[in-house]
Image (cartoon, rainbow, N blue to C red):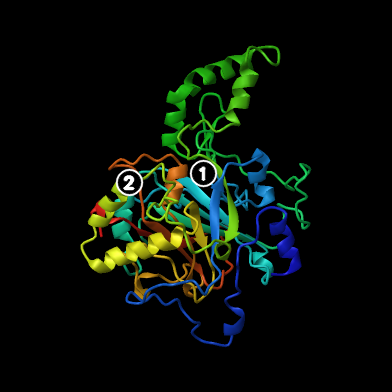
């Protein structure tokens, strides 16, 4: 990376490993496409894999958008804070509810001016029923637009832009964005608040459902007080100021807990785990899943190959069992699949929606993230084996600020879908 790009990363998180993918292929009519070989045992030991770990923010400002964070849960720190995804892109393709923010990764490509700042955002419907349907939908081919409950958006900006200083953040509390962003939904704090409360004209919403949820949760009473105050002769009448201030905070209490994602290279972790550390058979910290539950899951695999694959997956992540993310944007890199079944073929990965070029593997989300989100281990609770994200190999430019990429969901056999 160029030094200017590194400055942004080294003052906060360590930089992700980004390899330029299009410089050597400009003269080729058909750029190298991603190869996914179902019969080949993936082993990305030779590639530089970066791991992400969830930690509670030491200071709330560390996850603000002008500090270019990588984060999970809470609300997104939009890179372009104005031109957000439209309503047609921000809802679940099955239940129609607004999607919930899962995580974002700051992954600039400093070799290109247009990608000096670059962030990938992942959203998901919290309904396991929708995720089960999503897992079937992703196998469909053709021109028809897929319905998805998991969506990925890529946003990128040049160093000189309307939103942020061209100089790296100082991280001393003085950093500020150059401009304000769009008004967000008073309920979820995630999507653009394009609808206005017809009574108080103060609360904003991304959807009728979130407006109804906010009304039932207490805005019905707050709304009356705001109206009464606005009709009074003097400013600051009653406690309307508190009610208006409350509208600036996210009202929803079911968002996933917020974390920073801190970055480490996988190579720093010792591959030899001690026999008594209790981590070798646990996909989350040991106090969340026992050896009995691991064996129960293993028993669901009918083929010996599946058991071997699962054991290999467990052995690999045991080096750093709390990892919630694996990142490596390299043409030779492959996802670390937990299972043989439910993996995509090369034909299952679509072309870029904007430049029609190939997609490449960039990162995957691990099931450990569910532990940090306090997701219950119930049959109907959200669960996945891994969520693998493929992005435009050229990280192409388009007039739209948030470009939709492709996610592949692999579920456990217990979900009954594979």
Q: Quadrant of residue 4?
A: bottom right
Location of mark 2 (residue):
128
Tell me if I can see residue 160 in this picture. Answer: no
Location of mark 1 (residue):
73
Q: What residue sits 51% from the left and 50% below the top?
A: 103
**Coordinates of residue 126 in the picture (x, y in percent):** 39, 44
Is residue 32 depicted above or below 202 in this figure? below
Which numbered disc, 1 or 2, marks the residue that appears first in the sequence?
A: 1
Q: What residue sits 48% from the left and 63% below the top?
A: 272
Is residue 282 depicted above or below 405 in this figure? above
Lateral position of residue 79 relative to residue 151, left or right: right
Q: Could you tell me which quadrant the N terminus lies in?
A: bottom right
Question: Tag 2's secondary structure?
Answer: helix
Distance between the alpha carbons at the discs numbered 1 and 2 = 17 Å
Is residue 401 depicted above or below 293 in this figure? below
| Nearer to the camera, 343 or 401 | 343
């Amino acid at each position: 990376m160029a030094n200017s790009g590194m400055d942004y990363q080294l003052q906060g998180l360590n930089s992700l490993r980004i390899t330029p993918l299009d410089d050597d292929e400009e003269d080729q009519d058909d750029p190298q496409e991603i190869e996914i070989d179902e019969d080949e045992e993936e082993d990305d030991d030779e590639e530089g894999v970066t791991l992400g770990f969830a930690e509670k923010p030491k200071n709330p400002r560390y996850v603000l958008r002008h500090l270019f964070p990588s984060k999970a849960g809470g609300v997104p720190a939009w890179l372009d804070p104005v031109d957000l995804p439209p309503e047609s892109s921000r809802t679940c393709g099955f239940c129609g509810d607004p999607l919930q923010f899962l995580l974002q990764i700051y992954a600039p490509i400093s070799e290109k001016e247009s990608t000096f700042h670059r962030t990938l955002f992942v959203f998901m419907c919290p309904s396991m029923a929708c995720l089960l349907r999503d897992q079937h939908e992703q196998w469909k081919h053709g021109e028809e637009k897929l319905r998805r409950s998991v969506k990925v958006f890529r946003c990128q900006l040049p160093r000189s832009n309307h939103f942020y200083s061209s100089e790296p953040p100082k991280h001393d509390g003085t950093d500020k964005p150059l401009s304000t962003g769009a008004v967000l939904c008073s309920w979820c704090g995630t999507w653009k608040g394009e609808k206005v409360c017809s009574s108080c004209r103060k609360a904003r919403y991304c959807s009728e459902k979130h407006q109804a949820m906010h009304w039932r949760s207490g805005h019905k009473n707050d709304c009356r007080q705001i109206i009464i105050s606005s009709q009074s002769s003097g400013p600051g009448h009653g406690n309307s100021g508190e009610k208006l201030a409350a509208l600036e905070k996210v009202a929803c209490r079911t968002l996933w807990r917020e974390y920073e994602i801190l970055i480490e290279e996988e190579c720093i972790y010792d591959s030899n785990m001690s026999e008594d550390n209790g981590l070798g058979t646990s996909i989350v910290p040991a106090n969340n899943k026992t050896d009995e539950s691991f064996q129960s899951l293993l028993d669901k695999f009918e083929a010996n190959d599946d058991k071997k694959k699962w054991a290999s997956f467990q052995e690999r992540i045991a080096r750093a069992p709390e990892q919630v993310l694996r990142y490596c944007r390299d043409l030779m890199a492959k996802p670390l699949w937990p299972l043989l079944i439910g993996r995509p073929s090369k034909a299952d990965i679509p072309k870029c929606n904007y430049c029609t070029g190939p997609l490449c593997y960039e990162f995957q989300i691990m099931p450990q993230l569910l532990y940090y989100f306090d997701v219950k281990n119930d049959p109907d609770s959200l669960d996945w084996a891994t969520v693998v994200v493929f992005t435009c190999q050229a990280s192409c430019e388009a007039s739209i600020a948030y470009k939709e990429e492709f996610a592949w969901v692999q579920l456990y056999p217990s979900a009954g879908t594979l």
